[in-house]
Amino acid sequence: MLSAVLPAAVLFTPASAGEKMPDGDSLFTFGYKGTERQYRLVVPDSLAAGSPLVIMLHGYGGKADPDRFMMRRAAYRYGFAACFPQGEKDGRGKSCWNVGYPFQQGLRTDDVGFLCALARHIAGTYGLDTRNIFCAGHSNGGEMCYLLAYLRPDVFSAVAPLAGLTLEWMYKSLEAKEPVPLLEIHGTADRTSLWEGDPENEGGWGEYISVPLAAGYWAAVNRCTHEQTDTLHNGARQVIAHKFKGGHNGNEVWLYEMTGGAHSWTEDEIDTGATLWSFFSLYVKTGLTEKSAAAGPSAGR
């Protein structure tokens, strides 16, 4: 199995000892706009004060599951907290994130507001650094990552959609508020979220642009100046890593082109958890803020 080369580890000041931290098997609730929303949480018991937080979003019809995406292992290995929120059900009875699919018309769930409030709640509860909050998501969760990049760069310092799409309504109606580093991992043979886009809405998710165009948009927003291309091989599978570099404040945009890859988490081709953290760790800010230094571990809701 191939994995990305990780940068040097980031060191944090050790946190004070407290009660046993969540390991992802417990289901928590968080009240938002009169609704009790659910999430699972992985906080390694040796986690330092001011450590990062990664929000991990499931796909359409999915569920919050730390082991489904191998992110529990990554959280313990690299030293970050990981939160797995549960999407609410839509009119079809499927758990989802409200990103503006045609069949979500009339859906009033404010997932953007919920995810921002939840992220800040967890950071405050466990003494994490609010400057180091990241979001990754698969499929429908990937669409939400793109939406958060457009709307809430003040909360999420970088995003990583996997098999995610930029819906045409986002591309035409929204303007990026700030440069946001972005990593997309996407299979070229994905028949659910087409690499080449779906301008006629043949799949029913709404019109959406091609994956290279979506990544190119964020490369332009980040003012990246050049592209570095590396080719990785794992048996018959070829992975082309397009890395757009030289962006604003050192920002980069990565597009992992999984040649022949399907609509999957891609653990067989690369170590996705390691690749996600390799990217997010580039944007971890060190030195505790007054807010994060003052916050200590406490029981979650």
Image: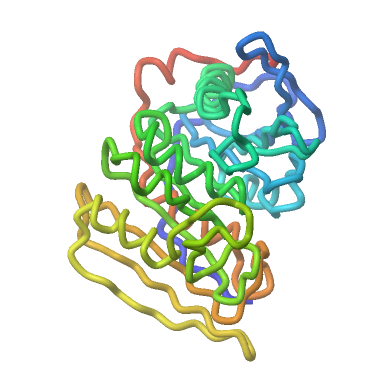
Q: Position of residue 35 (x, y in %)?
A: 70, 14
Residue at the spot 51% in from the left edge and 29% down from the top edge: 112
Q: Position of residue 21 (x, y in %)?
A: 71, 27
Q: Position of residue 189 (x, y in %)?
A: 60, 76
Residue that lies at the very extreme toward the bottom in this rendered image: 236
Write the residue at 46% across / 35% down: 133
How did the renderer colour the structure? rainbow
In the rendered image, the vertical position of residue 105 relative to residue 38, given as above or below: below
The answer to which quarter of the image holds residue 183 is: bottom left
- 83 in relation to 6, above or below: above
Query: How many tags in the picture?
Result: 0
Q: Is residue 283 above or below residue 83?
A: below
- Front one among 10 and 65: 65
**Percent x, y for residue 196?**
48, 71
- Please identify the quarter of the rendering in which residue 224 is found: bottom left
Q: Residue furthest top?
A: 34
Quadrant where the C terminus sits is: top right
* Side (left or right) of 226 relative to 46: left
* Residue located at (36% from left, 64% from top): 213
The reply, left or right, for residue 282 in relation to residue 102 is left
124 or 64, nearer to the observer? 64
23 over 128 or under it: above or below? below
For the N terminus, the image quarter is: bottom right
In this image, 124 relative to 76: left or right?
left
Residue at the image point whose x is 35% and y is 29% from the top: 154
